[in-house]
Image: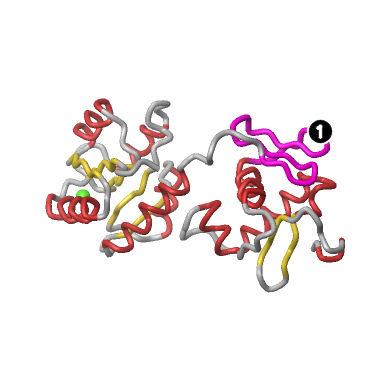
Amino acid sequence: MKTMPAILVVEDEPSIAELIAVNLRHNGFRPTWAMDGVSAQRELEASLPDLILLDWMLPGESGLQLARRWRADPRIKDIPLIMLTARGDEEDRVAGLDAGADDYMAKPFSTKEMLARVRAVLRRRSPEPVGEAIVIAGLSIDSSTHRTTYAGQTLKLGPTEFKLLHHLMANAERVHSRGQLLDKVWGDHVYIEERTVDVHIKRLREALGAAGRMVETVRGAGYRLTAKPISATMVV
Ligand code: CA
């Protein structure tokens, strides 16, 4: 992550925009304010921010319409997006996330919550360290080529399983709780439950085939990747 991440705040209410901007500035971010879709578009054409905070209710194009449009724009689509809104019901939340928002914050929110979500989304989107492959007991993962092999055979992993395995291998032998994995691999996303981790661990083990036994369940604690599983019965 850059030292001073740039954040585009799209919000038509000056007092709210000001409050957000002041708090971002005091916490090491560089906020820019746009009061509607037109000026936001102009900002995005001038320079790309590290994250967009987007209000739902805006004059002209709504935040939802903007989110959809930006997600279809190859230049903008990868910029993390958090939607802000007074609407808090499930249907709106789902619509926001479907439109490509990375997270969703219902007004009123505390500045502490806002900062936590901004940091979580940035952390989640920040690229894994590029370069060298990690190799453990014949299992190899390379984040620059996005390849995983075991005993020379290429393995097919989904994007989440890839990230999960990369994290486990980069921190091999260490036990990770489900909460820690959610935080590191998914970011602190409020809509993801801990059992999601179990689902992806299961998929990961299946994709790894014989190397799946290296992903160990540590009872009551979580998961770890180990070069030497103590016994096959440990692997649930
Ligand atoms: Ca508004």
Left or right: 180 in relation to 116: right
Q: Is residue 40 above or below residue 167?
A: above
**Quick one: quadrant of the C terminus?**
bottom right
Q: Percent x, y for residue 86?
A: 27, 58
Left or right: 108 in relation to 153: left
Tag 1, which secondary structure? loop
Residue reaching furthest to the right: 232
Q: Percent x, y for residue 210?
A: 85, 47
Of residue 8 and residue 222, the one placed in the foreground of this image is 222
Q: Magenta segment, which residues? A: 134-158
Which residue position is annotated with label 1? 152
Of residue 23 and residue 107, the one placed in the foreground of this image is 23
Left or right: 185 in relation to 135: left
Is residue 188 in the magenta section?
A: no
**Residue at horizontal 21%, vertical 37%?**
60
Few, some or many residues within 10 Å of mark 1 (<14, 14–19, 20+): few
Of residue 193 and residue 151, the one placed in the foreground of this image is 151
Q: Percent x, y for residue 183?
A: 51, 58
**Residue at horizontal 81%, vertical 61%?**
235
**Quick one: quadrant of the N terminus?**
top left
Q: Is residue 227 above or below residue 141?
A: below
Residue reaching furthest to the left: 14
Q: Amino acid at mark 1?
A: Gly
**Residue at horizontal 49%, vertical 59%?**
191
Q: Percent x, y for residue 165?
A: 66, 48
